[in-house]
Image (cartoon, grey):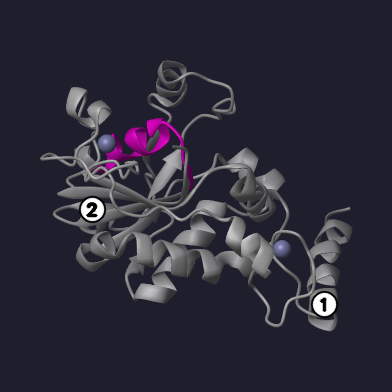
Amino acid sequence: MAALSSVAPLARRLLDLLLPPRCGRCGVDVPADATLCLTCWSAVTFVTEPLCEVCGLPFEIRPFGSAVCGACLAEPPVFDRARAAVVYDDATRSLVLAFKHGDRLTLAPLFAAWMVRAGAGLMEQADVIVPVPLHRWRLLSRRYNQAAVLAHALGRATGVNVVDSLLLRTRQTPSQGRKSAAQRTLNVRGAFALRNNCDGAAEVIEGRRIVLVDDVFTTGATVSACTRVLRRSGAVAVDVLTLARVT
Ligand SMILES: [Zn+2]
Ligand SMILES: [Zn+2]
């Protein structure tokens, strides 16, 4: 069975080579591979200024004075800054899900280009890119970690080193969907650790500025849990860069 299940993606990839390029979201023919058709492209809402300097939440109008949102003022996040390329809405949800579950990995360079633009300030100062890990059981059923795929595409686009074996999800956490912010925080508390056998983990983290990569920023609970681990291990800064963000 193992052999059969590995044939399917290969066959699909071969088929992809033979078929004309298709839109990564709706599947209509497009002139070039790994892109979107005009309709899907115009449905995507990019995160643009003005936004919260800390968590990257877009503001409807440019604020007077402090460009920090109420939530960040009331309770400053554990990470330094978070930025996202697109707003997570009906249009981008299908795109993210196709990337996460549907093997549409050819979209990674496009997403990375969007993320480089949204997180230019973060990437300029970054020493290392670290993806949010999946639990190994989930990795087995899904075959790839979408955050790691994004991290490597980002690394290729910027030349910043990617270390995807640094963090470990120590327990399988129930899906964060339909959970409140407080429930999400509890759900992922203590769920991450440094991988024991990661060679030179200390050198990778200590004194470094890290960009943590994930696909979607919802309440920030997951990236905050990862940030705590990285900070405890000596990271001087942890910024968060995601493909999409709930607003
Ligand atoms: Zn389309
Ligand atoms: Zn904020």
Magenta: main secondary structure: helix
> Horizontally, is 94 left or right of 136 in the view?
right
Residue 239: percent from left, percent from top: 27, 50
Dot 1 corresponds to which residue? 14
Q: Amino acid at mark 1?
A: Leu
For disc 2, the marked residue is 205
Helix, strand or loop at label 1? It is: helix
Relative horizontal placement of residue 77, taking residue 213 as reference (left or right): left
Residue 82 image position (x, y, % from top left): 31, 46
Instruction: Say which quarter of the image contains residue 192.
Output: top left
Q: Nearer the viewer, mark 2 or mark 1?
A: 1
* Residue 104 lies in the magenta stretch: no
Magenta region, residue range: 215-230
Regarding mark 2 in the picture, which secondary structure is present there?
helix
- Examine the image and state in which quarter residue 200 appears: bottom left
Is 131 above or below relative to 172?
below
Give how far across and how far down residue 227 sits, in percent.
Answer: 29, 40
